[in-house]
Image: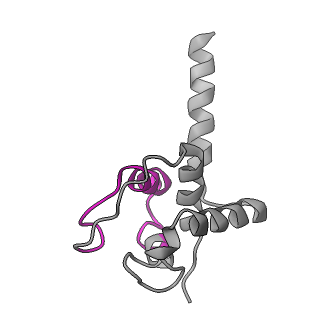
Amino acid sequence: MKKITFLLMMSAAHVAFASPALSAKEAAAAAELAKSSGCMSCHALDEKIVGPAYSKVAAKYSADADAAVSLAQSIRNGSAGKWGRIPMPAHGTMNQEDINLLARWVLTIKGN
């Protein structure tokens, strides 16, 4: 029984990352979270500030099936060298559910 429960949990986690599509409520919550967490200090929807525009991130990872997982890891742990010399700081105090939502949201941003 434990094995089946584990497999169901893993499948549910995979589904959560399988598609970046968000409901309107989730998208609004993610946008507010990006603002309140300071993400918008370094990123904008369609222009580079300190970090890349979210639309550029979404475009770069559009063909990557594991993009949401990769982005969530970058948000949690920070990253360096993916977009230039300036590293992205880690956001280790943010809860994983919020990180996952932000990662999925970023992947839905389309450029002009």
Instruction: Compare residues 110 and 85 and report the one nearer the observer.
Output: 85
Vertical side of 110 occupied by 112: above or below: below
- x and y, in percent, of residue 26 in the image: 72, 59
- For image coordinates 63% across by 9% down, the residue present is 1
- For image coordinates 70% across by 61% down, the residue present is 29
Furthest residue in direction top, as rendered = 1
Instruction: Compare residues 38 and 104 and report the one nearer the observer.
Output: 38
- Quarter the C terminus occupies: bottom right
41 sits to left or right of 8: left
Vertical side of 102 occupied by 18: above or below: above
- x and y, in percent, of residue 31 in the image: 64, 68
Which image quadrant for residue 74?
Answer: bottom left
- x and y, in percent, of residue 10 in the image: 56, 31
- For image coordinates 47% across by 86% down, the residue present is 47
> Where are the magenta residues, as a range?
58-84
Vertical side of 18 occupied by 13: above or below: above
41 sits to left or right of 83: right
Q: Is residue 66 magenta?
A: yes
Furthest residue in direction bottom, as rendered = 112
Q: Is residue 50 magenta?
A: no
Residue 107 visible in the picture: no
Which image quadrant for residue 22?
Answer: bottom right
Vertical side of 92 occupied by 47: above or below: below
- For image coordinates 43% across by 75% down, the residue present is 42
5 sits to left or right of 38: right
37 sits to left or right of 59: right
Numbered marks: total:
0
Residue 1 visible in the picture: yes
Q: Please say which color scheme the image uses.
A: one colour
